[in-house]
Amino acid sequence: MAYILNTTSLPGETARQFEGYLYGDVHVSFFVSSTPPGRGPSLHTHPYAEVFIVQVGSLTFRVADEMIEATAGQIVIVPAGVPHKFTNTSSTVAHHIDIHTSGQMETTWLEG
């Protein structure tokens, strides 16, 4: 069975969440994100890799102890189990796709 979804029908406001297990045997999940300036998630890990595709704006990532500046057109890959977070360092809303290489998202939060 094929599915057609509108991103606006996915749960969330600034980060629309798709989890593949909800749509059959799909082994990927992702966020379609519109992150306001100065915002982003706190430090966390996943037991699988996460891939970020920056479409508009700039994001500053902390990946373990490394700081990475990523701008539109760049891709950031965070290996499984590595603590990471990002902040929108643009003056406008940053648009990005955050791909979880798992059919169901699993996050361990390391900061409050």
Image (spheres, rainbow, N blue to C red):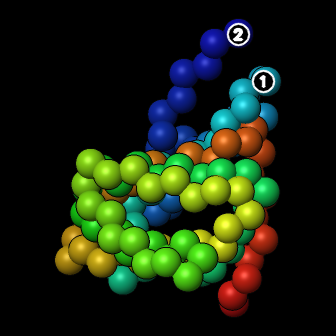
Residue 64, image quadrant: bottom right
Q: Quadrant of the C terminus?
A: bottom right
In the image, what residue occupies the spot 52% across and 53% down?
A: 77
Q: Quadrant of the N terminus?
A: top right
* Label annotation for residue 24: 1
Q: Residue furthest bottom?
A: 112
Q: Residues within 10 Å of mark 2 (few under 14, many from 20)?
A: few
Identified by mark 1, the residue type is Gly
Instruction: Find residue 35 and report its horizontal and vertical position in percent.
Output: 39, 67
Q: Taking 8 as reference, is 12 above or below it?
A: below
Instruction: Find residue 13 and report its horizontal and vertical position in percent.
Output: 50, 61
2 sits to left or right of 9: right
Instruction: Find residue 91 and report its horizontal and vertical position in percent.
Output: 20, 77
In the image, what residue occupies the spot 63% across and 12% down?
A: 2
Residue 11 shows in the view: no
* Label annotation for residue 1: 2
102 sits to left or right of 59: right
Instruction: Find residue 54 and report its horizontal and vertical position in percent.
Output: 35, 54
